[in-house]
Image (cartoon, rainbow, N blue to C red):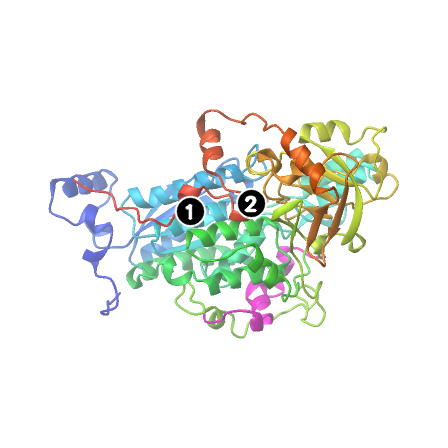
Amino acid sequence: MTHNTAMKKPEELRSHRWFGRETMRSFNHRSRMAQLGLGEEDYRGKPVIAILNTWSEINPCHLHFRQRAEEIKRGVWQAGGFPLEMPAMSLAEIFMKPSPLMYRNLLAMEAEELLRSYPVDGAVLMGGCDKTTPGLVMGAISMGLPFIFMPAGPMLRGNAGGATLGSGTDMFKGWQQLRAGEIDAGQWDDIMSGIARSPGTCMTMGTAATMMSAVEALGLSLPGASSIPAPDSRHAQMATATGKRIVEMVWEDVTPAKILTNDAFDNAVTCVLAMGGSTNALVHLIAMARRAGCSLDLDRFDALARTTPLIANIRPAGKYLMEDFYYAGGLRALLERIRGKLRTQALTVNGRTLGENIEGARVFNDDVILPLDKPVMREGSLAVLRGNLAPDGAVIKPAAAEARLHKHRGKAVVFDSYEALSKGIDDPALDIDADSVLVLQNAGPLGGPGMPEWGQLPIPKKLLQKGVRDMVRISDARMSGTSFGACVLHVAPESFIGGPLALVKTGDMIELDIPARRLQLLVGDEELERRRKSWKAPPPRYTRGYGAIFAQHVTQANEGCDFAILARRDAVPEPDIY
Ligand code: FES
């Protein structure tokens, strides 16, 4: 590569401080590189690219990452860089308990500190399974080095019994059918073996597809990268292209500060809304924006939701899956279709603007990516609610809820823990009907802890058998993007710290009014004050270890659940090398 004056010089590389000086310590570093089998010509004066790989034997969504890391390395070598693969904590959404969100901030810290403490000039972040995407990106934003996010990509469509199956969505449906006696144990087993049949992330519009798409729309992945199914050979080609480009980005000094603006975050939110994305996006994008010093909040989400049509016909709000979305043209085609809603001048990792990257992208199937005049919803695929039950906000996905419940009043049936709910929900004596409002307390950032994805509270068996498939449910938990139903989520402040949700009692009337964005507990102020005075804080979940650190620093859902100490924008000094 030739260097023009705008480009970095080899001695300006961050890694030069480790390898390029004529000091004893620099000699020591070079001798240990020799121990690794490397000659100085392999790395000296070259951009050192950390490949943060969240591969793990327990993470089926990242099963292909060992191979993809090799493909990224090939690209880095070809472009004249030096790749270093570094394992980072894998947050396997399905297996981590009590909630992978609790560990998102730990991954963010790990990513940031790996990049800071080692001789790194730029990074490729390998993630995709739900919280790995925001975790890696949050850490890399705070470190501030050039980086590209390489998305894992969705798995292939599920298949069993002649039906196409979507991750999560069709499991939840199947579970309801099993409990209602509509399918038998053999059919349930068939769903188990066929619903997840290749490497890659959930292929419904879950948090994984939502966040991979949002990060591409933010400008942090190569154009089109997020839609490619994980096993597709074009995914491997994208990995190599990512490796090549990150080397150029280091020379060009394309840092996240140059990409991440309020406009870029508006693009990410608009993308999420047009795709019918997961409610988890509110938590993650707000956390990412705060790391970047941008001003995204719940009100901005709601304002954009009122003008953005939902045009991706993907489960759970629609019919198809991410594999179909890719064949229909993928994210570039969707963004081109909503070009008028985007800030097209926003810069992206390939050095071009978002507008240039989507120019001319075509939709190949109008039933998957719908025309603007035939959307799934004209506006409001996500809605932010407020009221005396959620003074700091709550969220609902109207697109995934039965329309008759968008305005609803009903009597509360309250459970103060998930354990109590799972024991009591199918009790034939439970006083509940289709108009009741199910309430779960103590499932928020501190109460869960980590806001587990419990928000799609189960409908009682006796109502399922009567054909009820949706009812209003309220909690301070989150919900998987693959779930559906009239579920009010992320109620803030949470009940565990005495938020108004803690004061609800069985029999209280609750009003949900999505068009008016209102969530109201219809109990008088005096009575609420009386309850508030007699409320007692539960004991902390953890008194030692990471759980205690988490409880000490985590913020509420409307603030992104980041650690306040990590969201700060103070400069962190480069490490001394003596
Ligand atoms: Fe990994 Fe859904 S479990 S993306």
CA–CA distance between discs 2 and 1? 14 Å
Q: Are marks 2 and 1 in contact (CB under 8 Å)?
A: no
Q: Position of residue 547 (x, y in %)?
A: 48, 30
The segment highlighted magenta reads 319-345
Foreground residue, 542 or 515? 515
Residue 88: numbered disc: none
Residue 152: tell me if it is visible: no
Q: Which residue is mark 2?
A: 557
The quarter of the rendering in which ligand 1 is drawn is top right
Residue 498: tell me if it is visible: yes
Quadrant of the frame with the N terminus: bottom left
Q: Is residue 83 left or right of residue 285?
A: left
Vertical position of residue 340 compared to residue 291: above or below: below
Disc with the residue nearer the chain's start (2 vs 1): 2
Q: Which residue is mark 1?
A: 567
Vertical position of residue 323 compared to residue 129: above or below: below
